[in-house]
């Protein structure tokens, strides 16, 4: 979030009913009026399992 509170960013997994991750979202929110936020940008992408850690 910007210091003045006018923009915020959220991101995270989208899960199916069983709890398995199926996608990831990223959204930018804009403050329009006191207590009212609107999505200015919203993007989703298919879930990709993380690569195994290298030893």
Image (spheres, rainbow, N blue to C red):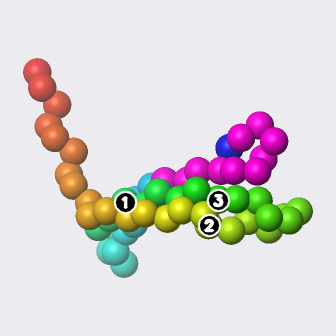
The mark closer to the camera, 1 or 3, is 3
Determine the image quadrant of residue 40.
Answer: bottom right
Identify the magenta region.
2-11
- Judged left or right of residue 26, residue 22 is left
Badge 3 is on which residue?
Answer: 29
Determine the image quadrant of residue 13.
Answer: bottom left
Is there CB contact under 8 Å for labels 1 and 2?
no
Badge 1 is on which residue?
Answer: 24
Going by the picture, which residue comes out furthest to the left?
A: 55
Q: In which quarter of the image is the N terminus?
A: top right
Task: Calculate the distance from the C-alpha at mark 2 to the C-alpha at mark 3.
Answer: 5 Å
Above or below, 2 against 13 in this view is: above
Question: What residue appears at the point 11 percent right and 21 percent down from the top-left corner?
Answer: 55
Is there CB contact under 8 Å for labels 2 and 3?
yes
Q: Which of 19 and 12 is in front in this view?
A: 12
Is there CB contact under 8 Å for labels 1 and 3?
no
Instruction: Locate residue 49, reporting x and y percent.
Output: 20, 52
Secondary structure at numbered mark 3: strand
> Residue 6 shows which numbered tag?
none
Task: Calculate the distance from the C-alpha at mark 1 to the C-alpha at mark 2.
Answer: 16 Å
Badge 2 is on which residue?
Answer: 39
Instruction: Locate residue 36, reporting x and y percent.
Output: 80, 68
């Amino acid at each position: 979030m910007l210091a003045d509170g006018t923009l915020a960013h959220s991101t995270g997994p989208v899960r199916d009913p069983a709890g398995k991750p199926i996608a990831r979202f990223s959204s930018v929110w804009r403050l329009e009026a006191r207590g009212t936020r609107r999505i200015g940008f919203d993007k989703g992408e298919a879930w990709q399992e993380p690569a195994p850690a290298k030893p």
